Amino acid sequence: QRLGQGQHKSYPALASIASKIDLLAIQEVMTEEGIQLLETQLEKQTGEPWGRLTSHAVGSTTYKEMYAFLWRESAVEYLEGAALYLDRENHFIREPFSAKFKSRRTNKELALGTVHILYGKGIKDRTPEIKALADYWLWLGEVYPDAPLALMGDFNLAPSNAAWDLLKQYAYPLITQGASTLSTKDATFANLYDNIWVKQGTSFVITDAGIIDFPRL
């Protein structure tokens, strides 16, 4: 939530959870200082170098944020192709960000897109961007034709909603039950908004998928 703004965040606590992961896609990056503080804490806690890739700020005239990827250098290598979506039809308030990576353990490549869907005043405001993700998915396939695809982010809509039907022609969500978005109650998740979508019949080996219950941790 608005990484780099406000004094209520504990970067050591954020890093203690993020350090369990090799590659992260982060939305709502408000300042370069915020992502730098998180990277610094990750390197301090893990004792090894981390890589960082940040988009430029995207959004409306009154509100902008950045996307970022963070990765453990010993496990992941950034290959190429960092790009914001060429949103010629102007479907997205915040154009999705993507890049191609490789596992240093298996040499498998993976192209990742990340997006923060408009929340708006209600579901009706969110559905146009969700429907437009089908075109974005096809664009990802053109930009990264030889790599398995994954789309991750804060979608502000549960995967059961009918607005996903267009994207479901090409991809499916890894998480279909439970909740992944914090509520106004301490240590409680409210909605299944944060998710990861992968290509139907993907060649990328997926052995498990789940939600890290970080308030409890």
Image (spheres, rainbow, N blue to C red):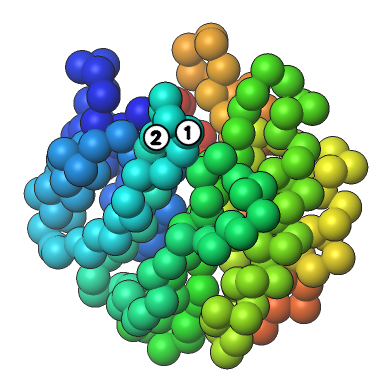
Q: Nearer the viewer, residue 14 or 55?
A: 55
Left or right, residue 126 beside residue 119: right
- Give me the disc on residue 43: none
Left or right, residue 71 beside residue 217: left
Q: Amino acid at mark 2?
A: Lys
Residue at figure coordinates x 25%, y 18% from the top left: 6
Quadrant in which the C terminus is drawn:
top left
Residue at figure coordinates x 78%, y 49% from the top left: 131
Q: Name the spot of residue 76 as percent of width and height, x first.
A: 33, 74
Residue 184 in sight here: yes
Look at the numbered disc 1 and give the secondary structure of its residue.
loop
What is the distance, in whole Å, between disc 1 and disc 2 at their CAs? 6 Å
Q: Nearer the viewer, residue 189 or 63?
A: 63
Q: Name the spot of residue 17 as percent of width and height, x first.
A: 34, 41
Q: Are marks 1 and 2 in contact (CB under 8 Å)?
A: yes
Asked which quadrant contains residue 135, the reply is bottom right
Q: Nearer the viewer, residue 123 or 172?
A: 123
Q: Amino acid at mark 1?
A: Ser
Q: How many marks?
A: 2
Q: Residues within 10 Å of mark 2 (few under 14, many from 20)?
A: some
Residue at figure coordinates x 88%, y 52% from the top left: 165
Q: Name the spot of residue 179 as percent of width and height, x first.
A: 66, 32
Look at the numbered disc 2 and give the secondary structure of its residue.
strand
Quadrant in which the N terminus is drawn:
top left
Q: Name the spot of residue 66 as percent of width and height, x first.
A: 36, 44
Residue 210 in sight here: no
Instruction: Using the image, determine if residue 185 lies above or below residue 82.
Output: above
Q: Residues within 10 Å of mark 1 (few under 14, many from 20)?
A: few
Residue located beneath label 1 in the image: 60
Residue at figure coordinates x 79%, y 27% from the top left: 124
Instruction: Using the image, determine if residue 13 lies above or below residue 140.
Output: above
Residue located beneath label 2 in the image: 64
